[in-house]
Amino acid sequence: MSELHASIIWKRTSPDFTYETYNRAYEVRFKDGAVVLPSSSAPEFRGDAGRADPEEAFVAALSGCHMLSLLAICARKRTRVESYDDRAVGFLKKGDGGKLWIARVILSPRIAFAEPVDRDTLARLHHDAHEVCFIANSVKTDVSVEPRFS
């Protein structure tokens, strides 16, 4: 079907290379370097809080994929969406053998439609979007949708 490409660029900036001192900052490059995402490990792992960490990027990827899936479904159904705002949260936990993993992600979208949409229709739209989301179909993380209402 498709090939997806991303480049990770890191270079040591510290005079030595120990766990305490090596830099965690790197760049993720997409589209042959046309899009650059400054990245790092999370601050809890000696990273830079001013950069995106891989776990945040994972949560954002799930959120973005769900949104794009829902927008496509709505467009095909001629249900016009005016805005979409999600406050996704991921939960890093210890799993079997003490290994850390993102066990759960909660998507909390608030959607404004041009015409009113009832809760049952909205629930069906979210269910259908989750079913076709490429990222959600690729992971073992429990992804749930808890819509926010105005």
Image: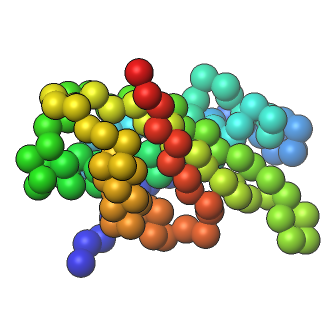
Please tell me which residue is depicted at 56% across the width and 56% down the height of the picture: 143
Quarter the N terminus occupies: bottom left
Q: Is residue 110 above or below residue 118?
A: above
Percent position of residue 107, x then y = 51, 43
Percent position of residue 126, x then y = 38, 52
With 28 as the anchor, is 10 left or right in this view? right
With 7 as the anchor, is 114 left or right in this view? left
Res 79 visible: yes
With 114 as the anchor, is 47 left or right in this view? right
Q: Return the residue nearer the eye: 116 or 70.
A: 116
Please tell me which residue is depicted at 87% across the width and 45% down the height of the picture: 19
Percent position of residue 40, x then y = 63, 38
Percent position of residue 73, x then y = 21, 55
Please tell me which residue is depicted at 28% across the width and 28% down the height of the picture: 112
Please tell me which residue is depicted at 33% across the width and 61% down the height of the picture: 128
Q: Return the residue nearer the eye: 94 or 28.
A: 94
**Picture quarter containing residue 115?**
top left
How many numbered marks, from 0 up? 0
Q: Is residue 131 above or below residue 40?
A: below
Q: Return the residue nearer the eye: 149 or 104.
A: 149
Residue at the bottom extreme? 1
Q: Return the residue nearer the eye: 62 or 76.
A: 76
Rendered image coloring scheme: rainbow
Res 5 visible: no
